[in-house]
Amino acid sequence: MFKIFKNPFFIYVFGFTLTFLVYSLGWSSIYPELSLEMKMFFSITFLCIVFFGILISILKLIKKTPALTKVKLISKFFYLILFLYTVEFFYEKDIPLLAKLLGRPGVDYDEFGIPLLHGILISFNSFLIAHTFSMYMSTKNKKTLIYYILLFVPALLIINRSIIVFGLLSSLFIYIHYSKKIKPWTQLKIIALGLIALFLFGIVGNLRSGGDYIYTQSNATKEYMNSSIPKEYYWTYLYVASPLANFQNTVNKKNIKEIDFTGFIFYENLPKIISKNLGEVFGIERKDLKRIVPWLTVGTTYARSYAYIGWYGPYLLFLFNLCLYIVVLILVPRKSSYHITTISILSVIILLNIFTNMLIVTGISFQLFYCIIFSFFENKKFIIRKQD
């Protein structure tokens, strides 16, 4: 079962198939019926990406290559990260976690940090978490494991959930890559831990929303509310299925009067670090999706692209992303110490595309850039070499 997770292209099919299955549960009455065009779009993308996934497997572009970067290099970058976060703490004159513990308002996590630097810093933090775990799985060096654990500390201090979630997911994919065979009992334990985590996620959601509020606001069906299914799993249903619902709602209600190809390229294909800072300068309008309710904000990786140029948007975005995936695999070859790190990061990006366009998120897309750069320079004289 877990073998399919070694090929990031197959993860695309797994992720969106899971979304469709969850959507079909019908626990909420506010979700629109999926159109024939929607089903055709995903069927075409499934066939296309499975073809390239099989081709990649035949060409053996994915290999369990050990990560043999020197621990000394990781140590230097770890202390550099700590120094830069410390600079940001002095800049903000506060530590978000400490503010929460002391009951002070503090700085919101999405506003924390020095502009530009912060986006680069959290992306490098996430990349280093993934690569350090890849090193540990390759060498079982305990010092590497300590650095891996400590690299989560800054995320806790600034209360940044994305670093933690991305770091854990990339670690899971790395574990799968380096494991020769995952025993059935281990597979069951992973699934059980996942179900427990989703149950706890629902408990936290209920505590934050005040209980029944979420069920009434999202029109949970009477059949579901009267069923024996633990209500805590409703949060998972909402978060997994609502992006597809928002995508369909955008298709149903978005009136595309004019094709905005410039906006599509600028906002849906370039990192936010560019579009966010230069969009207003160039006078390029940012368009949004049509939400089923205001507080469910994402629409898969495709909804906003539809808002700019109709169905051309999702198809073009899929082709652009597919080309980018292939280019990344080529630029970080099988022999590189960063090969499995790259595959794992790419896998997480493709999986999380069921929620939103992950490639334009600076803190995520830049991780692939680091993989390419470090892979290119890893054997150069002015870079600390791999271990002998």
Image: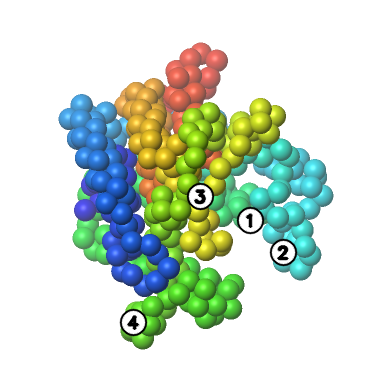
User: Which of the marked residues, 2 or 1, is nearer the chain's N terminus?
Assistant: 2
**C-alpha span from label 1 to label 3:** 28 Å
| Residue that numbered label 3 is attached to | 289
User: Which of the marked residues, 2 or 3, is nearer the chain's N terminus?
Assistant: 2
- Farthest residue to the top: give it: 381
| Residue that numbered label 1 is attached to | 159
Q: Residue at x 62, y 32 (%)?
A: 284
* Residue type marked 1: Ile
Other residues around mark 2 within 10 Å, as few (<14) / some (14–19) / many (≥20): few
**C-alpha span from label 2 to label 1:** 9 Å
Disc 2, disc 4: CB below 8 Å? no
Disc 2, disc 1: CB below 8 Å? yes
Q: Is residue 55 visible?
A: yes
**C-alpha span from label 2 to label 4:** 39 Å
Mark in the foreground, 3 or 4? 3
Q: On the picture, is 386 further left or further right than 382?
A: left
Question: Whole-percent x and y of residue 134?
Answer: 41, 40
Q: Quadrant of residue 376?
A: top left
* Residue type marked 3: Leu
| Residue that numbered label 2 is attached to | 100
